[in-house]
Image (cartoon, rainbow, N blue to C red):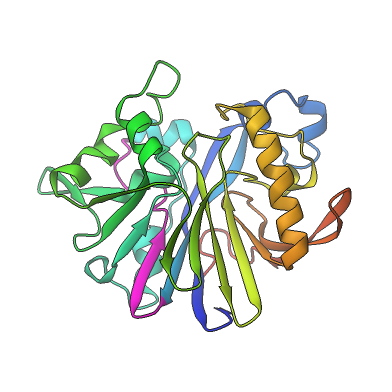
């Protein structure tokens, strides 16, 4: 699709399943299961969306999904459904890994940065050999020095090969990626979490990433995942996002909602509703 003059395609590395309680924090199951019924292991289905942006002579990838490095036990635990995966999605647009110029990591959790690296002949290497990986400095520091709570999702195999190859570009705060495409800080889920806004010719879109992974998280400010390290900061970030989206009539792109790919907000910052604009029509590939 086009956002003004900018080419933006929504890719999907597949689906995974995570505990519904973890995805909704303190919200009782009796409420959230009406929105996303869990499976018999209390897990909800989650898409693994990434963005392909082509503009100003650059090919940019926002997030890299779960990747292909999980073993059989891990794939079972997460209920992974990968289909053709991110690289297959890119190939459908004629993009091979060596053609990607910039990878923007919104944050470094395993379901967003797992595809940063891959195994080649038994060695871990960057999946995109010619790309700069743009990562918020605070996110990199916390991911490479995890604590007891974060080490299960900040995995060295997704990070260390990038540093060894010299492909990491650390950024601080809001940063223009190319004209019309901007990374900006949206903390709460992690302190270094970021979202991407695309603006061109009077049109705009916002990839919120884990500010509001599901439509339900955008409908209610207080519905915040248990994974968020600073939930009260997440609350205020969401409040600002709602006001910004309404003021600028941005298309909101969801990273994890299994049914709604993108939506519009209608109403005011005090009372709004989410109107789906793009819905899933294929069980795995949405491109």
Rendered location of residue 79, percent (x, y): 49, 38
What kind of secondary structure does the magenta stretch mostly adopt?
A: loop
Residue located 49% across and 62% down the image: 182
- Image-quadrant location for residue 34: top right
Residues 111 and 238: in front is 238
Q: Is residue 282 left or right of residue 8?
A: right
- Image-quadrant location for residue 32: top right
Q: Is residue 136 left or right of residue 238?
A: left
Rendered location of residue 226, percent (x, y): 62, 26
User: In the rendered image of this protein, does residue 24 appear above or below residue 120?
Assistant: above
Q: Is residue 208 magenta?
A: no
Any part of residue 200 in sight: yes
Q: Is residue 7 left or right of residue 248?
A: left
Any part of residue 49 in sight: no
Q: Which residues are magenta?
A: 55-71
Rendered location of residue 83, percent (x, y): 43, 57
Q: Is residue 93 left or right of residue 51?
A: left
């Amino acid at each position: 699709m086009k956002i003004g003059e900018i080419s933006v395609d929504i890719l999907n590395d597949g689906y995974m399943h995570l505990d519904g309680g973890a995805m909704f924090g303190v919200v009782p199951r009796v409420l959230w299961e009406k929105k996303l019924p869990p499976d018999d292991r209390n897990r909800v289905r989650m898409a693994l969306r990434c963005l392909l942006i082509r503009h100003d002579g650059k090919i940019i990838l926002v997030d890299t999904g779960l990747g292909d490095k999980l073993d059989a036990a891990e794939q079972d635990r997460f209920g992974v459904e990968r289909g053709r995966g991110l690289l297959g999605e890119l190939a459908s647009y004629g993009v091979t890994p060596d053609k990607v110029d910039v990878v923007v990591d919104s944050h470094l959790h395993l379901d967003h940065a797992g595809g940063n690296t891959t195994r080649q002949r038994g060695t871990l290497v960057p999946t995109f050999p010619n790309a700069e990986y743009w990562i918020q400095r605070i996110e990199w520091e916390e991911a490479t020095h995890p604590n007891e709570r974060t080490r299960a999702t900040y995995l060295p195999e997704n990070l260390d090969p990038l540093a060894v190859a010299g492909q990491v570009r650390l950024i601080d705060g809001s940063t223009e990626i190319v004209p019309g495409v901007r990374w900006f800080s949206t903390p709460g889920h992690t302190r270094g979490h970021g979202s991407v806004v695309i603006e061109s010719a009077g049109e705009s879109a916002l990839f919120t990433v884990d500010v509001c992974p599901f439509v339900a998280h955008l409908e209610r400010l207080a519905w915040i995942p248990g994974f968020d390290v600073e939930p009260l900061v997440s609350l205020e970030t969401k409040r600002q996002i709602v006001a910004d989206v309404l003021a600028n009539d941005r298309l909101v792109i969801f990273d994890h909602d299994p049914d709604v790919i993108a939506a519009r907000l209608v109403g005011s910052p005090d009372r709004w509703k989410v109107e789906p604009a793009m819905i899933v029509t294929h069980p795995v590939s949405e491109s």
